[in-house]
Image (cartoon, rainbow, N blue to C red):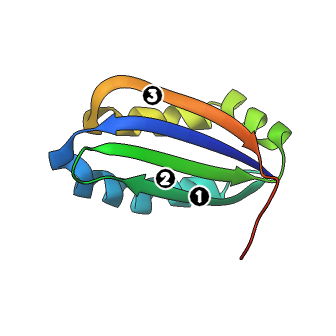
Amino acid sequence: MFARLTRFQGKIDKADEAIELFKNSIIPAAKSQKGFCGIYFFIDRKTGSGVSIAFWDSEEDAIANEKSGYYQEQLVKFMDFLATPSYIREGYDVVVQAD
């Protein structure tokens, strides 16, 4: 399994709108992607700092997902909620998992 982590600085007053967008748009779109395993979305309501972690069957699936334009399309949806236009994207092999 592979995890793609995206860190961002959001606008504090837009947190609820960002959460609704994530639930109603990002998750349904992600579920249709090849190799998608799950996703989490975290926001610190005091600072606006946020993290999304998407899980994929493999790094190849995550890379194919980015090359398809899907990842960029989802980022564009969030531009109005970001305090800064920058974000950090990182990828990790999932080496330990507990349910």
> Which kind of residue does numbered mark 1 sit on?
Ile
> Which kind of residue does numbered mark 3 sit on?
Tyr
> Which kind of residue does numbered mark 2 sit on?
Ile
Q: Mark 3 falls on what kind of element?
A: strand
Seen from the viewer's position, the closer of residues 37 and 2 is 2
For label 1, the crowd category at 10 Å Cα-Cα, with few meaning under 14, some 14 to 19 and many 20 or more, is some
Quarter of the image for residue 50 reads: top left
The answer to the question of whether label 1 and label 2 lie on touching residues, with beta carbons closer than 8 A, is: yes
Residue name at image x 71 percent, y 27 percent = 67
Q: Mark 1 falls on what kind of element?
A: strand
Residue name at image x 34 percent, y 23 percent = 85
68 left or right, relative to 85:
right
Quarter of the image for residue 31 reads: bottom right
Residue ID for mark 2: 26
84 left or right, relative to 13:
right
Q: Mark 2 falls on what kind of element?
A: helix
Residue 24 at what x, y percent from top left?
A: 41, 61
The answer to the question of whether label 1 and label 3 lie on touching residues, with beta carbons closer than 8 A, is: no
Image disc number at residue 87: 3
Residue ID for mark 1: 39
Residue name at image x 62 percent, y 30 percent = 69
**Seen from this angle, which residue lies furthest bottom?**
99
Which dot, 2 or 3, sits closer to the camera?
3
14 left or right, relative to 76:
left
First in sequence: mark 2 vs mark 3? 2
Seen from the viewer's position, the closer of residues 44 and 81 is 44
